[in-house]
Structures are given as C-alpha cells and as structure tokens.
Image (spheres, rainbow, N blue to C red):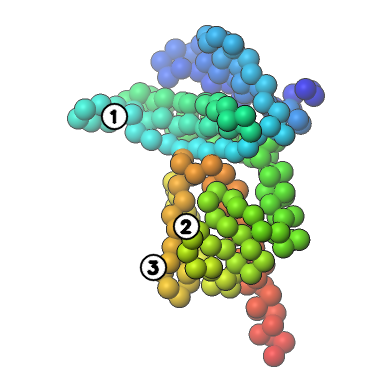
Amino acid sequence: MSDPVNTIDTSGSIQTKLRERMTFFADGLTINKPWGLGSTTFIANEDIAGFRFGACDLRGPRFSFGTQYFIEIKTFKSEIFRVKLNSWFGVKRKVYYSLWARLLQKLWDHSIAHQLQYYTELYNIQQAFDLAGVNFYADGISWDNGDRLKWEKIAIKTYQNYFMIYHAEEPTQYKCILFSVRWNAVILQSLLKDIVQEHAKVHRSIRRGL
C-alpha cells in the first residue's frame, strides 16, 4: 500500500459520527467502517473485476421514505464491497448526492480508468472480447446472439441511470444498459463513445477528401 492520495468520509443522515471512510492510494483503496466487524478492508486496483453504482428509492408498503445512493466493487474472487448513503425523508439528500458523485469520480480516477485503457488496447490490436455483455470485434459489436452492428451504424443515448446502444437506422435493434445492474457499464459506455467518435472522424475526413 502506497501513501494516501485522497480520503473521503461519510456520516449518518441523522448523527454526525463517522460511518465510512474511503481512502484512495495509487495501488488501491481502503474502506473503513469503524462500527463494523473487520472494519478496514484494502482492495488492490489489480484485484478489481468490476464496479457498478446507482440511486434507488427506499420504499415501504405504500410509499417511498428515502433515497439510497450506492457503489459496489467486485473482485476477481467474487467478493462484493458496498458503500451506501441513505437519505431518510430527504435529510442530507443533496449532500449525499454530491458525496456519491465525488466517490464515483475518485474511484474512476484512481482505480477504474486503467481498465478503460486495457479494453482500448484490446480494440486497437483487433482482439475480440466481451465487456458488460457486449461482444467486440474489429468491425463492430453484437449482443445476445444478435446480428453484428457495424461501428458506423452505432448510436448511443445516455440518461441518468442507463444508456442505450442502438442501430442508427433501425432503432428496434437496441440494448439498454443500467449502471446499477450491469458491472462495468460505465467503462462500456466510455469505450463505445470513444470508438464511435473515432469512426465518425474517419468518415468525415474521407468525405472531405472526395
């Protein structure tokens, strides 16, 4: 474990006592829960297989009584570590949303971005691979044993909780990816955007040269 580069603390929605502390290092991160058993866990970057995140309602039988913001990290040993921020009846909702967004950015910067680089390199050497349920090939992608979608035909729409991949000319060929359900969905989204933009630039350059 190297020297810490950033630390973010979370507290309860009612009490101000420390609930969780995430400390980011160049080679991984620790999750410290002072009130839990086995309070401190170190997760090396090289052990992280995936992550996902989301916001959901905390619901009773008849109504919603709060919002939960969560982040889940999965290791190659299938261990899952969860950080959650519960806003009861709207208390600290804006504070928790901002804190959740900060945690996601720090996790991406220090522990996840290198995975995007890894998959980009696979694409660059035209190595077939699977990412978040989407199959990548030299000339395009496919999913659920469907037809291959060529790079120049791919369109993407992004929403708050999910994004959609679809055929630009035949929108009935599509796949919906939820950030809260699919592991590494945001890596998939970032990689696809980069590749689609790259192919769009190539086609524009060709048209200008004609």
Q: Which residue is mark 1?
A: 59
On the image, the x and y values in percent for residue 62 come to 19, 30
Query: Which quarter of the rendered picture does the N terminus lie within?
Result: top right
Q: Secondary structure at mark 3?
A: loop
Cα distance, mark 1 to mark 2? 33 Å
Which is in the foreground here, disc 3 or disc 1? 3
Give coordinates of residue 49: x percent, y percent.
63, 37
Judged from the image, the secondary structure of the residue bearing numbered disc 2 is loop
The residue identified by callout 2 is 144
Q: Is residue 108 above or below residue 18?
A: below
Give the mark, 3 or 1, whose residue is nearer the N terminus: 1
The residues bearing labels 3 and 1 have C-alpha atoms spaced at a distance of 33 Å
- Image location of residue 204, percent across then percent down: 65, 79
Report, in whole angstroms, how far the alpha carbon at label 3 lies from the one at label 2. 14 Å
Give the farthest residue toward the bottom.
210
Q: Which residue appears at 57% of the width and 44% of the height?
A: 184
Mark in front: 1 vs 2: 2
Residue 34 higher or lower than 132, as above or below: above
Say which mark, if any, is on residue 172: 3
Q: Is 47 situated left or right of 131 in this image?
A: right
**Residue extending farthest left:** 62
9 and 48: which is toward the camera: 48
Of the numbered discs 3 and 2, the one sitting upstream in the chain is 2
Which of the two discs, 1 and 2, labels the residue nearer the N terminus? 1
Q: Residue at x 67, y 26 (%)?
A: 43
Q: Position of residue 183 (x, y in %)?
A: 54, 42
Specify the amino acid type for callout 1.
Arg
Task: Using the rendered image of the protein, determine whether residue 18 is visible from the camera's viewpoint.
Answer: no
Q: Residue at x 64, y 63 (%)?
A: 137
Residue located farthest toward the front when viewing the structure as drawn: 145
